[in-house]
Amino acid sequence: MSRGRLHGSVSTAALLTALALSSSCSGAVSVNEPEPDAPGRATCTELLAALPDQVLQSTRRPTEPGLWTRAWGDPPITLRCGVSPPPGLSPTSECLEVNGVGWFSEDAEGGVLFTTIGRAVFVEVGVPHQYAPEPSPLADLASAVSAHDPLLHPCR
């Protein structure tokens, strides 16, 4: 079930290097940019605009390239909107529900990847182990997801 990385197609080694290079809270976080389809872009635009300035009391940081991504804190909690479905997701996958939003979780080196389930657009959140318990940031993000990404099937 593990994709072995915190962010999209970035390898774990590349991710850890990027985290080390961007560990200053003032610097931009390099995040692999997803490519949402046309309906996904509209949803992502609204969702990203509604995200909080702080997650777990960590301040938002700029991301590069930054069109469909956001980050908070140091080490960064990252969000990518419009990602592909996780390869390990199946109809029998376990679903973690946080404030009405279903999430599929995968262990990754350095943290956990969470991807929304049952929504029009897949939203991925990478949470480093330093924020344990790792699902904690999801509570801060759930209202934006619920308000701007329609629920199609709860926890599926």
Image (cartoon, helix red, strand yellow):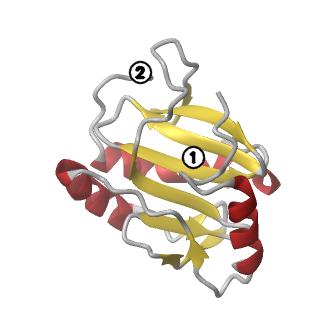
In the rendering, at what x and y percent does residue 127 appear?
A: 67, 52
In the picture, measured across the screen, residue 91 lies left or right of residue 126, that is: left
Secondary structure type for disc 2: loop
User: Can you tell which mark lies on residue 79?
Assistant: none
Element marked by disc 1: helix
Q: Is residue 135 left or right of residue 65?
A: right
Q: Which residue is mark 1?
A: 138
Q: Residue at x 24, y 50 (%)?
A: 37
Residue 5: percent from the left, percent from the top? 67, 48
Q: CA distance from mark 2 to mark 1?
A: 17 Å
Q: Which image quadrant: the C terminus?
A: top left
Residue nearest the observer in this picture, 132 or 6:
6
The quadrant the N terminus occupies is top right
The reply to whether dot 2 and dot 1 touch (C-beta < 8 Å) is no
Determine the residue positioned at 59% across, 54% down.
7
Assess disc 1: are there few (<14), some (14-19) or many (≥20) residues with their C-alpha within 10 Å of its C-alpha: many
- Residue 76 in view in this figure: yes
Residue at 52 percent across and 79 percent down: it is 62
Q: Please say if 20 is above or below 104.
A: below
Q: Residue at x 31, y 48 (%)?
A: 147
Under mark 2, the amino acid is Arg
The amino acid at mark 1 is: Leu
Give residue 50's quadrant in the image: bottom left
Tag nearer the camera, 2 or 1:
2
Residue occupied by mark 2: 156
Relative to 72, say whether 101 is above or below: above
Q: Which residue lies most toward the top here?
A: 92
